[in-house]
Amino acid sequence: MFDSLSERLGATLKTLRGQARLTDSNIKDTLRDVRMALLEADVALSVVREFVDHVKERALGEGVMQSLTPGQALIKIVNDELVKVMGEANEELDLTTRPPAVILMAGLQGSGKTTSVAKLSRWLKERKKKSVMVASVDVYRPAAIEQLKTLASEVGAEFFPSDPSQKPLDIAQNALEQARKQAVDVLIIDTAGRLAIDEEMMAEIKDLHAGIDPVETLFVVDSMTGQDAANTAKAFNEALPLTGIILTKTDGDARGGAALSIRQITGKPIKFLGVGEKTTALEAFHPDRMASRILGMGDVMSLIEDAQHKVDHKEAEKLAKKVAKGKGFDLEDFRTQLQQMQNMGGIASLMDKMPGMGQMAGAAKNVDEKQFKRLEAIISSMTMKERLFPAVIKGSRKRRIAAGSGVQVQDVNRLLKQFTQMQKMMKKMTKGGGMAKMMRGLKGRMPPGMPF
């Protein structure tokens, strides 16, 4: 997300380097490029105008610190204004009510609403330690009810059964009654999606809202529709009191216009981002962290949170102790590291959040994530002896491993080469000051202000 905008803004702000101060002239030229970058990212025109005006006013004002270079000063201003546009701070779900807290999910057909119900259920269970029940009132599409049942089973949420012959409000009220009986913390209601906003749809969801009085009414919208996403959310909000937005398919949206437009146009906060197809691919939306990523400064806090929640800490600790004792790094360890990386969203996701690496994330997306599965398959085709002692893998063994994993012998050779490189890196890390040396080597590629 924001790949093109990040690249354009980065190139634009570079032009100020080496200039002594901010002037009317260089600010005007820079802001013209910023305006074009935002418009190309499909940000709504009204939002672009207001954003550029605020940046210009601050850049020429007394608030600019004289000690900073022009580039740094403008980056700080642009960063602050991006945060303002997207909503200042993360707005959490309001679950401070007598259980069950009811969440009503609304959205157009194809926006990823049912999948978002499952993702949110998983997020609530894992991050907030809440028990969750889900129910579908989409009586127009029996397949949607079955889909939610399957997803509920996958994420460990309680599923309340419903039937196309029932009325949506009856289903919702029965689910609420059942959730109370079972002392469930959160009840999520998945509503019917339509191809467009119409009176019938609005009347139905208004009745639902009045009948179950949800603490949260979340609008699920496809980020790839750009500023249309913001306009759709606005129209919906005029008919129903929304409390927040879930922006889906952000992993496929290189522009990011919806994220930059939606808060300004609707007045409602983005609460979550859908960042992939898996039920683990949901992130709480933090405007300050997103602004930092747009400007290529990474998102260290989200990276830490991902590591806390998605990395197997027992495995990581075991590997650290093993390497520290000089027992070496084998192919079994290599496979574990590949799995951990996938759990954290893959190479592109990691680079996008690492300071100074944002521009490399776009290239990383071109790496076929299936390659990780292929590497795992190759290692799984080895015997335990081969994984622990890779040196024994010669010609006949390579051919057997290739046949067992459905790849060519050169693929096995490539994996062994990658493993050897990682093994060397792990050895360096165990020697005195290995990590410190590595960080010093990266210093030149880090943005200003990084503590290395």
Image (cartoon, rainbow, N blue to C red):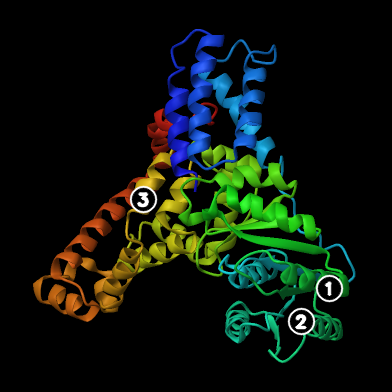
Instruction: Check disc 1 and report its element: helix, strand or loop.
Output: helix
The x, y position of residue 376, in whole percent, is 33, 70
Residue that sits furthest to the front in the current view: 199
Question: Is residue 321 found left or right of 140 in the rendered image?
Answer: left
Q: Examine the image and state in which quarter residue 438 appears.
A: top left
Res 235 seen here: yes
Residue 168: mark in rendering: 2
Q: Examine the image and state in which quarter residue 202 appears.
A: bottom right
Depicted 411 relative to depicted 273: above or below: below
Residue 207: mark in rendering: 1
Q: What residue type is labelled 2?
A: Pro
Q: Are marks 2 and 3 in contact (CB under 8 Å)?
A: no
Q: Distance between the residues labelled 2 and 3?
A: 45 Å
Q: Do the residues labelled 3 and 1 touch (CB within 8 Å)?
A: no
Instruction: Check disc 2 and report its element: helix, strand or loop.
Output: helix
Give the camera-side residue of 103 and 347: 103
Q: What residue type is labelled 1?
A: Asp
Residue plotted at (34% across, 46% down): 428
Q: Are marks 2 and 1 in contact (CB under 8 Å)?
A: yes
Mark sitting earlier along the chain (2/1): 2
The x, y position of residue 265, in whole percent, is 70, 44
Instruction: Check disc 3 and report its element: helix, strand or loop.
Output: helix
Q: What residue type is labelled 3?
A: Ala
Crowdedness near tag 2: few (<14), some (14–19) or many (≥20) residues, C-alpha within 10 Å: many
Q: Distance between the residues labelled 2 and 1?
A: 9 Å
Q: How far apart are marks 3 and 1 (CA)?
A: 47 Å
Depicted 51 relative to depicted 1: above or below: above
- Which residue position is annotated with label 3? 364
